[in-house]
Image: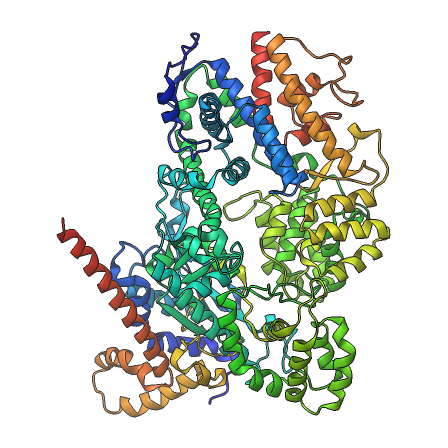
Amino acid sequence: MEFSGVKRRKPWLIGDQRKASYPHSLQFYLQPPSENISLIEFENLAIDRLKLLKSVENLGVSYVKGTELYQSKLEAEIRRLKFSYRESLEDEYEPRRKDHISHFILRLAYCQSEDLRRWFIQQEMDLLRFRFSILPKDKIQSFLQDSHLHFEAISEEEKNLREQEIIASSTSLGGPKLELEYVYKIPFADALDLFRGRKVYLENGFAYVPLKDIVAIILNEFRAKLSKALALTARSLPAVQSDERLQPLLNHLSHSYIGQDYSIQGNAGKISLDQIDSLSTKSFPPCMRQLHKALRENHHLRHGGRMQYGLFLKGIGLTLEQALQFWKQEFIKGKMDPDKFDKGYSYNIRHSFGKEGKRTDYTPFSCLKIILTNPPSQGDYHGCPFRHSDPELLKQKLQSYKITPGGISQILDLVKGTHYQVACQKYFEMTHNSRDPDLDNRRLLTACPVLGMYALPTMPTVGTIFKDIVLREQCVVETAWMVYMTGRRITENDDMNRGEKETESQSLESSVNERKRPGGQWMSVIMTFPVNILLFLYILLAQCRG
Amino acid sequence: MEPFDPAELPELLKLYYRRLFPYAQYYRWLNYGGVVKNYFQHREFSFTLKDDIYIRYQSFNNQSDLEKEMQKMNPYKIDIGAVYSHRPNQHNTVKLGAFQAQEKELVFDIDMTDYDDVRRCCSSADICSKCWTLMTMAIRIIDRALKEDFGFKHRLWVYSGRRGVHCWVCDESVRKLSSAVRSGIVEYLSLVKGGQDVKKKVHLSENVHPFVRKSISIIKKYFEGYALVGQDILENKESWDKILALVPETMHNDLQQNFQKHHSSLQRWEYLKKAASQCPSNIKNEKCGPWLEWEIMLQYCFPRLDINVSKGINHLLKSPFSVHPKTGRISVPIDLQKVDQFDPFAVPTISSICHELDAIFTSEAEKEENQAESDIKHRTRDYKKTSLAPYVKVFEQFLENLDKSRKGELLKKSDLQKDF
């Protein structure tokens, strides 16, 4: 991709040529763009797509994906930002082009670490899923062909032989209407999302997939391709970075985000071991509370529990020494030989702090990871109580935690609807009522990293925090843009946010230089969200232009 | 059988590794025909030595190198890991991040401890002939799925030496599978979900997937003998209360009363089935009819897999023909044709086969004159004269199939090359 500082000349494609370059309202981004664009457009496109992906993320947490509300809000957002999404009579060239180019720009920003890649892939997949869901059926075949997905439909006889099995396996098929459906025979590994949930019929290494279920496969293909592409991009990044115009942009991208979910270094050594018991009942999320209780009661935890709880303790600030002491003290109470502990368990603790083996400083598990992987079995206490506990037992647990009956039934309803994280949010709202005006001076630690928050005693409700962050981020994006455009610093009089004493620009600048500073707490939190990458590039540009 | 004394392990292992361990077959397996360069050389092994000393990233140049090292170090336990991008014993010399696990067999570990909530005869590390049927059912169910649903051809089932079984799936394409697909396979094969907190661990949807249906028909063959007679799961109030926890509350009174009237688990089970088919299934989320019966059978009999063992490409698993340091039993391959007859208590221990060897050796040494010559001759025949022999035969059959497959593939490839 070439960049020119000169005012860009739009390539003049006429009618059919424009249509031909972007024949569909969605795409797999297989070919990078090859036209010239200005730096200004480069940044504009990136910001817009970033806003879009951030909306995708927010909507995905606030609403159930696929519901009417979710779909309509997402559609509105896409339309507002002028990206492509639907076939229409209007000239779709501009939005499709914007979609195409902005995707590739963000690849540059998001290829640089595992966390960034994961986030980017997740939002792009949700976006693609939405667009595919509104694609008319007759357009599907041609889209698949153009995307080089060669799914072969099986013959009538083959279908008849397996009719019963296919109907019994595919939940999307309602009743014996198999004659009307196309069924595709695909190697099982290409149908991962389908076969793992037993939603498709498998025979001799092949999955027999009705057209309706093709979406899952397409998303899988997309994820695989994008993942590979991001890895390749990361490797060729140095060549791009040598371009002087892009150097400040991309330099900042690679330095400002350190690829952790939250500033662990900022937290280390800030809690003492004797605080843990009371913190566990007052401030821990229920998953960790239950693990702590089990550990105290049994003087032991199995591997899954040790991982989940151990990394959490690290995240809230336990140092390696404290962690070793903590676990050893407890295990010894369970009549474990201190030497056995040193031999068998301390290595693992040091490993999780990045002091052994390949020295990865592991981050605590995110909610999604806890909910979706490694479910607990007999003798385990890890997992997410909202996801993994019997509703009856969950109810009893909540009662013992003194949640009001109204709150409990709300939570149970959310659990029934599989909205586990929202249920946890609700739990938080129920257990933390006061809103602390002295927010800046409190350290905000993380335990439910989707939101990136968990509170020490007397923190404002998580719901409010979440809203604050979203608002703040939107403000921050707007603010940074304004700073960039006008070169003007925001003063205290600007009503950009709700009653925070510190000004946005001050906090943004201070964070560029230094991660941890009293009052800079909000920034260390906001730093955790990937959107910050481009925020800082704009601050830098603003400072360059004076 | 000679009783096993763990204190004798160092001596026994010395003899085992010198005379009995089937190196030739072992190498033949892990070399996979030498088709891929350095496949064996890049394989990680880990040894657990005396006094719990654990060393990882062992690798060997060839069969004789492997033999020498094993005889020198006398490992108490041997684990097999992945095939890496470089020789594991040189991994420290490799640039950071470049040393990666690339391929490994798909493995499964089924452990009897995971069934403690549903077996009445034993708990934790103990097993007996009554609960071993759980392993038999597990092998049948999982093996059928691996073969018929996934199309995997080369599956080696091995007794772990104490309380479970392992499965090694060795197809070429399978060794290349990603961690995500491996996880997906385990998920596909999982039905029993939940820890201490959950009472009812199996929930079937109205649509019963063919995998579930076929698994249920396998369980049906064993259920009466294993659960109703052997485990006697409806023997008394204490035990049938556990079953009632899996059944809608509305049925409890009726079942309690009628269970009292019957005299055996068999009768009570029949009654439960009848009651289930009659109960109206209009209560939300509560199923009746055959689903109820199936859910109970599955909770008591369906295999429980440890996903962590299967999903990681670099996960280390106990090697076949390794010795279990606590029981002395050899991890032997299981003959799938005779899985119902497999008896873990009949599996030879290291002391028993060493004892057998001693008996033969003393009588043969009198005939042989050249010690060195007899050494080599012995090594190729020694295990054959012990009770280890039939198990090595099973292993050899497995290797034959691998070879045949490989030849078939090579032929196909060369055919394609000849065609333009």
Instruction: Tell me where residue A537 appears, x and y as whole percent.
Output: 56, 19
Instruction: Tell me where residue A303 appears, x and y as whole percent.
Output: 61, 59
Q: Is residue B177 above or below residue A65?
A: below
Q: Is residue A145 left or right of residue A135?
A: left
- Name which residue lies at 62% across and 75% down: B293
User: What is the basis of the colouring in this image?
Assistant: rainbow
Q: Nearer the viewer, residue B299 or A227?
A: B299
Number of callouts: 0
Q: Quadrant of residue A499?
A: top right
Q: Quadrant of residue B406?
A: bottom left
Residue B103 in sight from this viewpoint: yes
Q: Is residue B385 left or right of residue A43?
A: left
Q: Nearer the viewer, residue A153 or A198?
A: A153
Q: Is residue B43 above or below residue B360?
A: above
Q: Is residue B19 above or below residue A463?
A: below
Residue A403 in sight from this viewpoint: no
Name the image quarter holding the N terminus of chain A. top left
Q: Quadrant of residue A347?
A: bottom right
Name the image quarter holding the C terminus of chain A. top right
Instruction: Tell me where residue A444 appears, x and y as whole percent.
Output: 74, 35
- Name which residue lies at 24% across and 60% down: B409
- Name which residue lies at 72% across and 28% down: A522
Q: Is residue B248 above or below residue A299?
A: below
Instruction: Tell me where residue B174 appears, x and y as whole percent.
Output: 38, 58
Q: Is residue B191 left or right of residue A21?
A: right
